[in-house]
C-alpha cells in the first residue's frame, strides 16, 4: 500500500501524476494524433508498461527499474519514474519506451515526484528533503533543507514547493528557484499523508482525522474541519468550492473550502479503507480495500449511484478521462477499464505481473 500523494497523483498524487498517485491533482497529455496510451508501474515486474487506451492492448515496456515503482510522471515526450531500491529518477522515451538516463541517487526510497516544464522535484525517505533535477539531462541541481523525516507529499505552483510528511507535522515551503526555505506552517499535529493546494491555500490531511487549512502566502493557520473525519485521512480531492476526504472511515466526507464547515458524507459506506478519489464535474469515483470496486457518488448530494464489477484486489489508483475509468491495484495486477456512464466493464490489460501503484494516462 502506498499512502500519500500522490498520489497521488495520484498523483498526482504533481505528478502527471496520478495520481498519484498521486497522490491530489493530475496532468494529462496527448501523444500522437489518434492513439492514446496508459502507462502503469508497480511491484514485482518493476517496469513501466504501455497499453493502448482504446483496446487495452500491450504495446511495450521499459527495461527494469530494479525496484518497486511508486510514482510516474509524464510530459509530451518522456516518462519519469521513481521508487524503491534503485532510488533514482529514471527517464524513458514514450514513443519506444527506451531508456534515456537517470539522476544520481536520491539516497532513499522515492514516494513523490512532480515535474514542471524544466525540472523534476523528488521527495522520499532517508534523505528526507526535496531534491531538484534538470529534466533535459537529469543532472542534479540542488537540495532543499532537510524536512526532518520522510517526505510523503509534494505539491508545486509556479514559484514554490510545499512539502508534508512524517513526524515533523508541518508543511514546509521552499522557493523553486534556489530551494531556500521560505516558511513553515503551525503543526498539523501528526503525520501528513495528503496535501493539496489551490491558488491561495494549502489543505492537509493525515493522522489527525481532520483537514487543516493554511494561507500559502505566509503559511499561517486559517482553520480546520470542525467535524472530524473520524479516522486517518489518506486522500483529499477538491474542486473550486469543496474538499472531498477519504480514508480509514470508509466514507467520503465533504467540507466547504471557504470556512471548512461540514457539508455531508456518503450515506452508503464504501466498505473498506479509501485510498484514491477521482472526480469530474458531476461525480466522485472512489477506490480502496475490501470492497475492491469503484463506487460512484453524486458530488452535489453524495448519494450512491453504483458500483463497477469487483476488481478482485485492493484498488490503489484511479484515473479518468471524459468517458472512462482506469483502475490499477493488487491481486488482479491489471489495468481495468470501465464506462463512466453506467460503470460497465469494458476490458483490461494483460497482467502487469505485480501490484500496480501508479497509472498515468494521455488524453
Image (tube, rainbow, N blue to C red):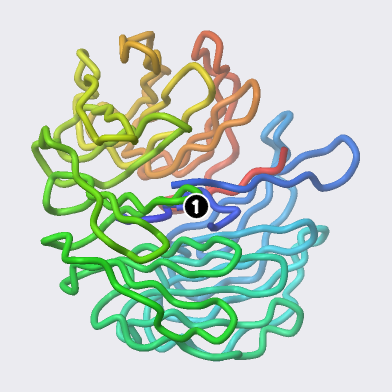
Q: Number of labelled discs?
A: 1
Q: Considering depth in this image, is 48 or 158 the residue closer to the camera?
A: 158
Residue drawn at x 74%, y 48% as measured from the top left? 59
List x then y, in percent, for residue 28: 67, 45
Q: Considering depth in this image, is 79 or 322 the residue closer to the camera?
A: 322
Q: Would you name the residue on which mark 1 appears?
A: 12
Q: Is residue 235 left or right of residue 335?
A: left
Residue drawn at x 38%, y 13% as measured from the top left? 300
Please tell me how crowded label 1 is: few (under 14), some (14-19), or many (20+) other residues with Cα within 10 Å.
Answer: many
Quick check: 52 above or below 86?
A: above
Q: Considering depth in this image, is 225 or 132 the residue closer to the camera?
A: 225
Please tell me whether mark 1 sits on a helix, a strand or a loop.
strand
List x then y, in percent, for residue 174: 44, 77
List x then y, in percent, for residue 234: 26, 47
Residue drawn at x 23%, y 68% as measured from the top left? 170
Quick check: 100 above or below 294?
A: below
**Residue 20 visible to the viewer:** no
List x then y, in percent, for residue 66: 50, 76
Quick check: 209 above or below 269?
A: below
Q: Considering depth in this image, is 97 or 237 the residue closer to the camera?
A: 237
- Quarter the C terminus occupies: top right
Residue drawn at x 37%, y 68% as measured from the top left? 163
Quick check: 324 above or below 190?
A: above
**Residue 316 visible to the viewer:** yes
Q: Residue furthest right?
A: 33
The answer to which image quadrant residue 146 occupies is bottom left
Amino acid at each position: 500500500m502506498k499512502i500519500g500523494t500522490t498520489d497521488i497523483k495520484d498523483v498526482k498524487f504533481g505528478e502527471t501524476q496520478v495520481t498519484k498517485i498521486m497522490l491530489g491533482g493530475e496532468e494529462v497529455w496527448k501523444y500522437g494524433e489518434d492513439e492514446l496510451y496508459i502507462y502503469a508501474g508497480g511491484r514485482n515486474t518493476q517496469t513501466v508498461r504501455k497499453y493502448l487506451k482504446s483496446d487495452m492492448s500491450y504495446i511495450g515496456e521499459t527495461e527494469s527499474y530494479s525496484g518497486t515503482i511508486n510514482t510516474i510522471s509524464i510530459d509530451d515526450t518522456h516518462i519519469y519514474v521513481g521508487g524503491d531500491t534503485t532510488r533514482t529518477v529514471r527517464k524513458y522515451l514514450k514513443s519506444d519506451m527506451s531508456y534515456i538516463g537517470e539522476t544520481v541517487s536520491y539516497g532513499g526510497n522515492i514516494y513523490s515526484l512532480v515535474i514542471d516544464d524544466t525540472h523534476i522535484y523528488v521527495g522520499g525517505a532517508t534523505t528526507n528533503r526535496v531534491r531538484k533535477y534538470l529534466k533535459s539531462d537529469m543532472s542534479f541541481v540542488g537540495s532543499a533543507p532537510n524536512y526532518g523525516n520522510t517526505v510523503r507529499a509534494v505539491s508545486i505552483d509556479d514559484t514554490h514547493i510545499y512539502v508534508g510528511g512524517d513526524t515533523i507535522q508541518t508543511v514546509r515551503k521552499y522557493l523553486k528557484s534556489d530551494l531556500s526555505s521560505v516558511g513553515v506552517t503551525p503543526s498539523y499535529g501528526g503525520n501528513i499523508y495528503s496535501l493539496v493546494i489551490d491558488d491561495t491555500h494549502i489543505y492537509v490531511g493525515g493522522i489527525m482525522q481532520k483537514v487543516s487549512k493554511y494561507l500559502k502566502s505566509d503559511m499561517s493557520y486559517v482553520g480546520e474541519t470542525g467535524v472530524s473525519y473520524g479516522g486517518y485521512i489518506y486522500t483529499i480531492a477538491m474542486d473550486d468550492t469543496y474538499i472531498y476526504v477519504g480514508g480509514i472511515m470508509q466514507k467520503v466526507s465533504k467540507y466547504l473550502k471557504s470556512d471548512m464547515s461540514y457539508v455531508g458524507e456518503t450515506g452508503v459506506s464504501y466498505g473498506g479503507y479509501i485510498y484514491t478519489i477521482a472526480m469530474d464535474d458531476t461525480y466522485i469515483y472512489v477506490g480502496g480495500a475490501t470492497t475492491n470496486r469503484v463506487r460512484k457518488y453524486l458530488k452535489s448530494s453524495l448519494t450512491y449511484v453504483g458500483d463497477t464489477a469487483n476488481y478482485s484486489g485492493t484498488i490503489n489508483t484511479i484515473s479518468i478521462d471524459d468517458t472512462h475509468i482506469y483502475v490499477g491495484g493488487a491481486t488482479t495486477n491489471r489495468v481495468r477499464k470501465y464506462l463512466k456512464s453506467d460503470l460497465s466493464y469494458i476490458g483490461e490489460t494483460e497482467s502487469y505481473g505485480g501490484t500496480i501503484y501508479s497509472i498515468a494516462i494521455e488524453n
